[in-house]
Image (cartoon, helix red, strand yellow):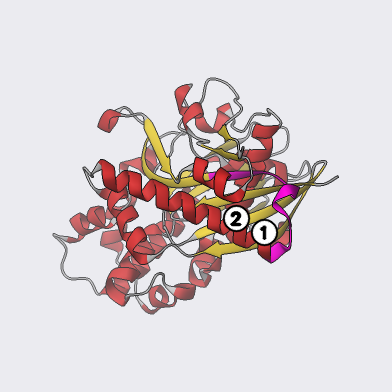
Amino acid sequence: MKDLYVGLMSGTSIDGIDAGLLEVDNNQYRLIETHNHDIPAELKSQLEHLSTAESFSVDDFGGCDRQLGQLFAQAVNTLLHKANISKSRVTAVGSHGQTVRHRPTTEHNGPFTLQIGDPNIIAVETGIDTVADFRRKDMATGGQAAPLAPVFHQAFFGDHRISRAVINIGGISNLSKLSPNEDLIGFDLGPGNRLMDAWSQRHLGEEFDRDGNWAASGSINRKLLTKLLAHPYLSQKFPKSTGREDFNLQWLDGLLENEEKIATKDVQATLLEFTAESIATSTLEIFTPDEVYICGGGALNTELMKRLQVLFGEKPVQSTLLLGIDPQWVEAAGFAWLAKCRIENLPGNSTTVTGASKELTLGGLYLAN
């Protein structure tokens, strides 16, 4: 009988909860239903505060943890209703949670990583065993705890005949190097959509720059681009991971303080180029893939995809849709797959990706009963 798993993902953009229903038949995977669940504006604002503030109240933290758990449960129940699937058919839910802080180095009392969205509530309100807290066990053995996607990318997108770069462009971008007969390599490349989205929200009142049209209307400011590309994270050796702690509007504002006034559309054009160049440069420094596939929200940014194609040259830059999964749902499918790994006691990390001392079964199991 085919097994079913639900994956839940809320990324650094905090733009909604992605829920995917993954069908597993031996080593064949198929995403059979998806659902995007809104996060209310007030809760989103609170999560933004938790993710950026130097300090916050325990009451705020606990309230957000509870509310998110309830929203995640609602997302699962809505997904199963859409799919006309009984909860009894689902083996487990895999919930990434919402990252509110990721400190992979010893700075700022690290290393630690923290995701919220109470899995006890998910398990109880869906009636389905839930796997969560995927990252901290990897960190406990010396790993970065991120990215976790490359192991799933290898299982779903790997091909023994050709090398592929699978690049997820969410709030942060990350790379999976999938090369036949070579170690799996993956790391966070740097900025994805996060800076562009935040700049759009500030100046247009829009959640994101649709198709990159606003960026396309501007001109790249080379002086600002040089400053952006000088961020020390970009020159660090992997294994490495990052988040909004490194790439945020406060950092951007500091770079703009001593500049002559730059038109807002030109800043957006420069931010898009920053994302494109940091992705292409870091990828091509470690290998020359036969094919490049993009997933995450960045795959829907037409202008960004155009720039990536130029920077990668003759190598085709395409959506993961061509490999069988819509780019918007790859991360949700990944956490459904990681839940499967936990239930079957299989490793969910890679030592060559995160730097952990050993391969591990990841995630805590929260029983529905």
Could you tell me how far apart the alpha carbons at marks 1 and 2 are, in whole angstroms? 6 Å
Residue 76's label in the rendered image is 2
Assess whether mark 2 and mark 1 are in contact (beta carbons under 8 angstroms): yes
Instruction: Single out the residue that lies furthest toward the right.
Output: 1
* Position of residue 338 measured from the top left corner of the image (x, y, whole percent): 63, 39
Residue 213 against residue 326 in the figure, above or below: below
Q: Residue at x 48, y 46 (%)?
A: 97
Taking the magenta stretch, the answer to whether it contains residue 90 is yes
Q: Is residue 237 left or right of residue 306?
A: left
Please give the count of numbered marks on the rendered protein.
2
| Label 2: how many Cα within 10 Å (few below 14, some 14–19, many 20+) | many
Taking the magenta stretch, the answer to whether it contains residue 271 is no
What residue is disc 1 on? 80
Q: Amino acid at mark 1?
A: Leu
For the question of whether residue 144 can be seen, the reply is yes
Residue 248 against residue 338 in the figure, above or below: below
Could you say whether the residue bearing mark 2 is in a helix, strand or loop?
A: helix
For the question of whether residue 295 can be seen, the reply is no
> Which residues make up the magenta segment?
82-95
Residue 265's label in the rendered image is none
